[in-house]
Amino acid sequence: MLELAEVFRLHGAAYRARFGARLLPSQVRAMRDIEACRTAYFGGHLKQCDHCGQKVFAYHSCRNRHCPKCHRDQTERWLQKQRARLLPCRYFLLTFTLPSELRPLARAHQKKLYGLLMRTAAAAVQKLALDRRYLGARIGCLGVLHTWTRALLYHPHVHLLVTAGGLSADSTQWIEPKNRTYLMPVEALSVIFRAKLCAALKKAKLLPQARPQVWKKDWVVHCQPAGSGQKVLDYLGRYVFRIAITNSRLEQIDHGQVTFRYRDSRSQKLRRLTLPALEFIGRFLQHVLPRGCAKLRYYGIWSSSCRRHLEQARALLSPAPTPASGPLPATPAAPEPVAAAAPLPSARCPHCRIGQLIVIEVLLPQRKFPP
């Protein structure tokens, strides 16, 4: 299977030679890490089967948050944690898109603009949710930043997984929306979102760099029911620890051209796109986030400062236990001590499929990298 790392190995040096002066440190680091992922550059382990004696090299991964080969286990752990945190209620998925007129500004001030985009989107939802005409309650929001389309074009937007309901001001009630298929008007939401981002840019002294016509047009906000939230979590989880494209979507690289497939968001038809390798690399790198830029944030009763409110909401939504009939049970005996968990078994040998692979040597990183 063709990998992104192979595209970088074949054409990364040419891209750095041509555009190196424009690259951000985070982009240079992403190229280096992805290119060297699971090679001797990062070191590894030499393992041997305790049955057939076969030796297996296992190189370390780069752990870069933009690498398509890393973070599978981390993604699964994150999904398990989020599923456990989900409240037993319905959800809505809201999508806030940054207008095209502001995208040059976002490119020039990525860390600042991405943070403002997420905060103002969440603030707009929270403000409207407090309005008694729609809900009159404090909601929970999980925000995930995306900057790409399926064709790898630059398209900054934020997905918000929002509770369909919220906690009352005195934390004694869980308030449901009046309509099961409707949370709040997106027209009003887009107006509030636009005003809040305008005010945030003014405070950050970036407003003069924005095109004036952007404040006169309608902004795009979508809202749709998301059921229990599980399917939306699975979708968001694919890109929480990586970006833009997976290796499975890459089809071929030939004569300096990279072909990959994507599903058109409007027609839902599978399409293929062939780009010059340098353009393909450029499209990928524009989605590499600067260091310290968070793409995942929690708001409302899901924020870290509102854990008590989250548990109050969970208690209100959980059904009360049914009292057991009959005589009261006897006082239980003291529980037996739990034995310590056994260590996880080593990986099974891929050759004989009987023995276990045992680490016999640590391979030190070989820090040699082409320019």
Image (cartoon, rainbow, N blue to C red):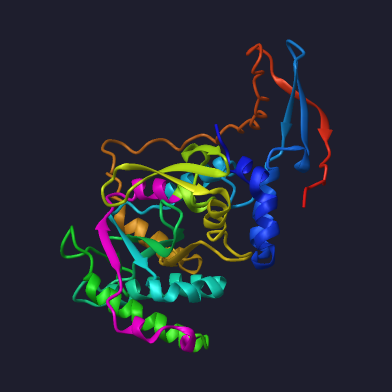
**In this rendering, would 178 be left or right of 370?**
left
Name which residue lies at 37% across and 62% down.
160
Q: From what the image shows, is residue 337 above or below residue 53?
A: below
| Relative image position of residue 59 (x, y in whole percent) | 72, 35
Residue 323 visible in this rendered orientation of the protein: yes
User: Is 273 or 79 nearer to us in this picture?
Assistant: 273
**Image coords of residue 289 (percent x, y):** 57, 62
Q: Residue at x 43, y 67 (%)?
A: 299
Q: Quadrant of residue 169?
A: bottom left
Q: Which residues are magenta?
A: 207-236
In the rendered structure, the answer to whether residue 84 lies left or right of residue 320 reads right
Above or below residue 169? Residue 141 is: above
Q: Quadrant of the rendered structure where residue 335 is?
A: top right
Residue at horizontal 83%, vertical 42%? Answer: 366
Residue visible at 39% across and 70% down in the picture: 98
Report x, y in % for residue 101.
Answer: 40, 76
Where's residue 119, x and y in %? 44, 73
Q: Nearer the viewer, residue 293 or 303?
A: 293
